[in-house]
Amino acid sequence: MGLDFVAVTLILAHQFASGRLFIQYGRLLWFLLFVVAATCSLLLNSDSKRTSYGLFLVTYSVFTLTRPSTPDQYKSTLQTFQLLVLILSWLAIVQFFAHFIVNPRKLVFFFGIVPESMLIQPGESVEIGVKSNGIFLAEASTMSQIAALGILVEILEFRRPRHLLVLTLAFLLAYSGTGTSMLLLGLPLAALVNPKAQLPAMGATLFALVLIATGFIDLSIFTSRLGEFQDPGASGFMRFTSSFWQAADYFKTASLQELFFGKGPGYGFISAAFYVASSSAWFKLFLEYGALGTFVYISLFIFCFRRSRCPKPLLFVLIYYHFVIGNIIESALLEIIVVLCTLHGPEPRRVRLNEPGEYPSSLVTGSTV
């Protein structure tokens, strides 16, 4: 489990134990069905990894939690999120200019500052000094994704020009295709759903075009990656295309039991040698837990997203990221999905515990448990 999610899990567990968070019975029921489906896959496959199974269940147990809140309280959460994204964006901008006078490796990976054994080693695709990762994020693509979400929240809820310009510049300096795909989906949808978002969206787009036209942003870094979708050794192919090839190979040889229950938690799909494989959430989910686990998993998500306070365009982009770009366990934005989409819920009608009524509360606090 990543250290970031360890912190999130401990915080939520403390909030639940202190009575500030609730377990919703409907979500708990779907989660228990989810546990049954995952357990069946584990028991029917001798080569399953119990560590992956345990991590899988711990990760998604937080989806059962909810915090009854008002629209103003949820908006306060969005404001805090925007503040954090703004700080990372300023760091990404400063990082870009600082790389001209400071060793870029120290800015990106803290080499020479903290022991190298504690750091993620840079991959071959990392262009030190060109892409900004906000210093504290694992990759420049993560900075791009975070900035893209910040841009969507800003145009949908707050529409502050100075914030929007900073977020847009940081997004461009990350030079990542994943964040670009999120905005290509999110901006048109936001403009269609919320007419007030049309002008800010046009302003951010115009600002980006000016930076590209003046040569401040090197457009060739974006356009040169368009061919990656057809290159079996490129990251674009690995993220967006390889899962479909893996699925085609898998369906040719899978048994009926494997199709229904999966090949077990933690199963590593061995692809053909001529292309680089990376399983997107939708395929890895079906591969490990089969049709049964996939159905219950999606049902759990749908139930958790019911009556969500998250703006619909932002919700759509987060779902796209999770299933197409991310991983079922290691998704960098899974914590954000919980906080922005599933944790905040409508305030329930309060009832006294010692006076049973016709419609009892569907929530239970940690202290009551």
Image: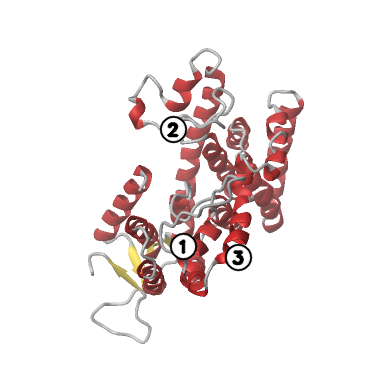
**Mark 2 is on which residue type?**
Phe
Does residue 31 appear left or right of residue 313 in this picture? left
At 51% from the left edge and 60% from the top edge, which residue is drawn? 309
At 28% from the left edge and 77% from the top edge, which residue is drawn? 352
N-terminal of the pair, mark 3 or mark 1, is 3
N-terminal of the pair, mark 2 or mark 1, is 2
What is the CA distance from the residue labelled 3 to the residue labelled 2? 43 Å
Does residue 149 appear left or right of residue 26 in this picture? right
What is the CA distance from the residue labelled 2 to the residue labelled 1? 32 Å
* In front: label 2 or label 1: 1
N-terminal of the pair, mark 3 or mark 2, is 2
What is the CA distance from the residue labelled 3 to the residue labelled 1? 16 Å
Residue that mark 3 sits on: 252
Q: Is residue 137 above or below residue 319?
A: above
**Mark 3 is on which residue type?**
Lys
Secondary-structure class at tag 1 = helix
* In front: label 3 or label 1: 3
Question: For the residue carrying disc 1, how many other residues have a C-alpha within 10 Å: few (<14), some (14-19), or many (20+)?
Answer: many
Residue that mark 2 sits on: 136
Image position, residue 355 (x, y; %): 26, 83
Image position, residue 78 (x, y; %): 49, 48
At 72% from the left edge and 40% from the top edge, which residue is drawn? 227
**Mark 1 is on which residue type?**
Glu
Question: In the displayed image of the protein, which residue is found farthest to the top?
Answer: 101
